[in-house]
Amino acid sequence: MRRPVIAVDGPAGAGKSTVARRVARALGFRYIDTGAMYRAVALKALTTGVDLRSEAAVRQVAAETEVDLTSGPGGETRVWLDGVDVTEALRGPEVNASVSVVAGFPSVRALLVERQRRLAADGGVVMDGRDIGTVVLPYADYKFFLTASLEARTHRRQRELSQMGFAVDAGALREEIRQRDALDQNRAVAPLRRAEDAVVIDTTDLSVDAVVDRILSLVTARES
Ligand code: DC
């Protein structure tokens, strides 16, 4: 029997990657962080000096970029760009500032969406992003949309970044997240929005364990 596919969408800092990774581990599924794919393309464009305003040039970078996701010793996701571990670099301020531009190019999205569909084709996958339930995998067996207040999301990102050694000002981070939300929600192609058939979970006052448990109980109830 084909194992199910689970889509997890939502804005930055809603807890998608932590939750999706934990759900994948509990089910023995593969976790796919699609944001990391857009970030990897942005990082490569930045480091190779490609003009980020040129869709054709960025698409070319995406076409020539190989992104692999592996699990580190503690279960964390490591992201490899053309064979180099770029996990930390992907979270840096330069990538944060330019990734929405990269993700706004339709031809870049088309290329990455095709790769994402291939990764999910055999099932047994938890995929997180912004358009997984709406565009990438509209026939996903389960769809979840995680939200949280801007305050909670800022606080989480700040903690995550400081654990990685980046010192950030909360006010500036809050503003950056707010701007990125606006760009993600208002772009012409595949904007961030909830699929009509997605289960919405507001994670503002929920622990990671509580969110993971809620998802697992919905999935296992239907699969058993
Ligand atoms: O989840 P994240 O913060 O790593 O995502 C990075 C950026 O990529 C974010 O601005 C939204 C964009 N993105 C997207 O447009 N579609 C996806 N499926 C995943 C991420």
Image: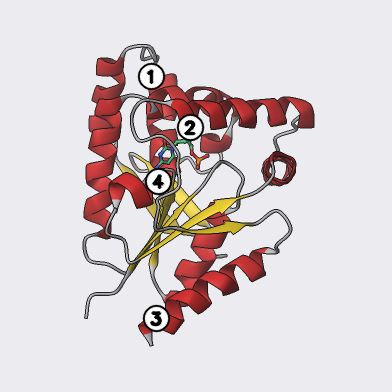
Residue where numbered disc 4 is placed = 34
Q: Is residue 194 above or below residue 177?
A: below
Residue type at mark 2 is: Gln
Helix, strand or loop at label 3? It is helix
Q: Looking at the picture, tell me which residue is in the foreground, 135 or 54.
A: 135
Mark 3 CB within 8 Å of ligand 1: no
Helix, strand or loop status at disc 2: helix
Q: Position of residue 73 (x, y in %)?
A: 53, 64
Q: Which of 49 and 25 is in front in this view?
A: 25
Earlier residue among tags 1 and 2: 1
Q: Is mark 4 within 8 Å of ligand 1?
A: yes
Earlier-in-chain disc, 3 versus 2 = 2
Determine which residue is flagged by label 3. 222
Name the residue tied to disc 2.
185
Say which label, 4 or 1, has the lower sequence index. 4
**Dot 3 or dot 1, earlier in sequence:** 1
- Label 4 – label 1 distance at C-alpha: 22 Å
Marks 4 and 2, how far apart at CA: 17 Å
The amino acid on which the numbered mark 1 sits, given as a three-letter code, is Thr
Residue holding disc 1: 48
> Badge 3: how crowded within 10 Å, few (<14), some, or many (20+)?
few
